Amino acid sequence: QLSAAIKLNIDFDRKDSYSTPERPDNDLMIRAALGEDVEKTPVWLFRQAGRHLPEYHAYKEEVGRGFLDMLSFPEDVAECTMQPIRRYDMDAAILFSDILVIAQALQIEVIMPGGVGIQVPNPLSGPNDVEDRIPKTSEMTAEYVDEFLGYVIRSVKLIREKMAEEKISIPLIGFSAAPWTLLFYMVGGSSKKNTDFGMKWLKEHPAESTRLLETLTKIVVEYMSAQVEAGAHMLQLFEAMGMMIEEEEFDDFALPCLEAIAKELKGRFPDIPLMMFARGASFANEKLATLGYDVITIDGTVDRSTARSIGSNVSLQGNYDPAELIESNGKTVETVRSTSKEMLEELGPNRLIANLGEGLGGKESPELVNAFVEAIHEESAAM
């Protein structure tokens, strides 16, 4: 069967040269990502900043701002980014932000009413809305990112300053949502209801979906580029809504975007590790491993014994179960150590970035998170 994959028509305005930050003193995670020699397995956690930390809740109360509001205050972003790396011996910091800031930059309102997750109250109501409400792909320039996402880029610079001040020299990870995930929210409005709208759009409005994905692909590239130029050492792309798309549509619509992003970012920044996470779409990992990403993330559904079969030229990231870090589940420092060791034995300690199969939910114990970080370092060093 002939591939029905969309052809993206994007003219990337590449500058003559791009700057890449120097490696930090602790470059363990960069080395693991690129398949260089490591003395132990590096570790960081999805959502390591924020909800599970008492100091996060205290700070939030102190400034009197909600999560979304905090994102536009670089000093808030820097503080929240720093909290977990002060507390734990993490091998990377990750920019404290949200996947939907790109939707906001395209003038799509995003709200967080509390208890129901993040929402888009006025999603695109039909195919005509793409033309009427979404800027053209050609408008997605570095200048556009500076105008509408400049607050994030200023935050990246401030984080790097704070890290230097506090003498924590580890990689800073920049990140973005991937195009399909953004489309999903922009047409359905929520991860809880109307979850079939994204697939409906791809099937019923393929031309408009493609046009939207082109705009999204281009802004993702410019946004991630700006993060690197502001000081991010590594990049993580989140296809967070991989569970909401069928394999055929993933191949036809999502994959061409992910390929274009990897190709363009590697062209601009050959030495910056690119990490990919298609959450709930592990069927795609083998294909993703051929696109230029250095690291493929495995979620909790992936069988560790065959996880390496996706390709020997990529490193793996994942896939510890965050439920193992919740004390009310009967978990202890001892159980965490034994399940951490088990993961290292099953995946192997090399070409691995120890992480979770999904992000911290907020009920996890900082003591057990710390036990996980320590166990990964100590057990992998002994292997």
Image (cartoon, grey):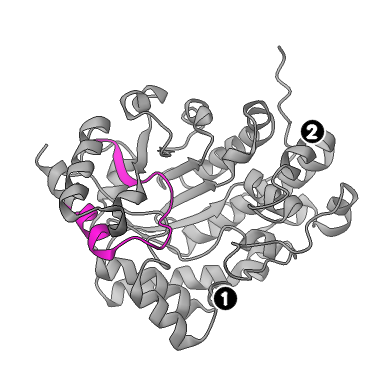
Mark toward the start of the polypeptide (1 vs 2):
1
For image coordinates 54% across by 34% down, the residue present is: 281
For image coordinates 32% across by 57% down, the residue present is: 92
Residue where numbered disc 1 is placed: 72
Disc 1 and disc 2 in contact, CB within 8 angstroms: no
* Between marks 1 and 2 in the image, the one whose residue lies nearer the viewer: 2
In the displayed structure image, the side of residue 260 where residue 30 appears, left or right: left
For image coordinates 15% across by 50% down, the residue present is: 334
- Residue 203 bears which disc, if any? 2
Question: SS of the residue at dot 2?
Answer: helix
Residue 27, given in percent of the width and then of the height, sits at: 26, 52
Residue 158, given in percent of the width and then of the height, sits at: 43, 75
Residue 244, given in percent of the width and then of the height, sits at: 63, 40
> Which amino acid does the dot numbered 1 rest on?
Ser
Viewer-proximal residue among 106 and 8: 106
Asked whether residue 195 is drawn in magenta, I would say no
At label 2, counting other C-alpha atoms closer than 10 Å, the crowd grade (few under 14, some 14-19, many 20 or more) is few
Viewer-proximal residue among 79 and 233: 79
369 to 33, vertically: above or below: below
Question: SS of the residue at dot 1?
Answer: loop
At label 1, counting other C-alpha atoms closer than 10 Å, the crowd grade (few under 14, some 14-19, many 20 or more) is some
Residue 33, given in percent of the width and then of the height, sits at: 34, 42
Viewer-proximal residue among 91 and 145: 91
Q: Which residues are magenta?
A: 349-374
Q: Is residue 312 visible?
A: no
User: Which image quadrant for residue 223?
Assistant: bottom right
For image coordinates 65% across by 43% down, the residue present is: 180
Asked whether residue 354 is drawn in magenta, I would say yes
Viewer-proximal residue among 275 and 67: 67
